[in-house]
Amino acid sequence: MRLLSATDEDVARAGRLRTVRLIAIAAWVLGVILWTATEGLAIDYTRLFIIVCAGLITASIGRRRAVAVIRDWLPFLVVLFLYDLSRGAASLLGRPTEWYFQINFDRWLFGGTDPTVWLQAKLKAPFAPWWEVIVSLVYISYFIAPYALAGVLWLRARAEWRRFVLRFVTMAFIGLAGFIIFPAAPPWAASQCTAAEVATGPSDPGCLYAKPGSAGGGLLGSRTDYRAGAAPWVERISNRGWLKLGLPQASALIDEGQAGVNQVAAVPSLHAATTALIAIFLWPRVRKRWRPLVAAYPIVMAFALVYGAEHYVFDIVLGWLLAGGVSAGFSAWESRRSNRGAEFGGRAETDGAAADILGAPLVNRP
């Protein structure tokens, strides 16, 4: 009988660990599905990071120790947990909610036209058309994409992971400051409330929970040129695509998750800011053929937000400016650090194993 060499034993052990890893990943996927089915979609940072960290631990079996996940991600989780607590406390400061400024800005920008009202009048059908599936998928990607990207970067390019995390966390806290300084109602809320109901700038008026259309279009008014059979007022329709897919449960779970968050945390739009941040971050790190897709992401998200009555154009513009400012600030800071390191004979922080999500080196490409 031939004795196994050390190399053979290592190969056999690696094979066993790979099997365990695949089983653990399958169990993680099943657990996420069951948790979502029973508790609703995870749209708060705490639950999202429990899911992400559990997934990274399973993906790290046989590759690196689980303690590395805790060491690297726990500070990130603590910071965003504090952000969630602060976001809930923002409504306790008593600042009146802004209901008109965003409407007036959009009308000024578009020559007296409300973009959300116009888009729904021209495009909204009585039932979701096929392309609203794309709207719903893009909208919900906000709750997944930044954490998925962070997870991939952590597994493949730790230096890049740190860069992305610093940008994302900083942007989240600046967004929180915006929610506190300028609490603002989104279009779907304005369409359900009358001027009398929001005269004092309430953050949680009863009209938010009224049946759509009960206010006759509310602050946004109604139009006579809506498509036949469609409701002649603005509705929150960002989740109708799930109904087209025959998944009403998914739509219900998302609606349930949305009901538990701050309804007047709209300025700046973190949906717009996050997708823009992802696009800016990935642009120099992916192959040229993927750049049109990267650039299209924040643009399609903006359409989904305005058409779905989730945000005004004003909110989106501020979100894009936020992402651009944070990205430019960190890039300048990293460049100064790199130059200072070169000046003193050091080297910039690099990750020799860095690879982009498509498998190519993480380097700037012309």
Image (cartoon, rainbow, N blue to C red):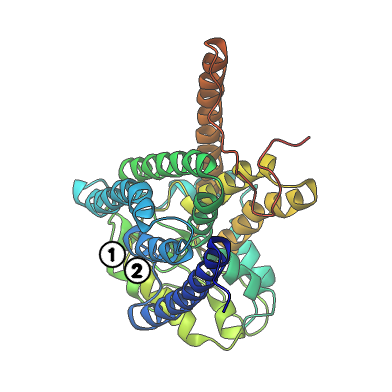
Badge 1 amino acid: Pro
What residue does disc 2 label?
A: 208
Q: In the rendering, at what x and y percent does residue 28 appear? A: 43, 74
The residue at 52%/33% (across/down) is: 325
What's the CA distance linking mark 2 and mark 1?
6 Å
Q: Residues within 10 Å of mark 1 (few under 14, many from 20)?
A: few
Q: Element under label 2?
A: helix
From what the image shows, is residue 297 above or below residue 251? above
Q: Element under label 1?
A: loop
Q: In the rendering, at what x and y percent does residue 240 appear? A: 55, 78
253 or 154: nearer the viewer: 154
Q: Is residue 106 left or right of residue 208?
A: right
Q: Residues within 10 Å of mark 2 (few under 14, many from 20)?
A: some
351 or 207: nearer the viewer: 351
Q: In the rendering, at what x and y percent does residue 313 appear? A: 56, 50
Badge 2 amino acid: Leu
From what the image shows, is residue 154 above or below residue 135? above
| Disc assigned to residue 205 | 1
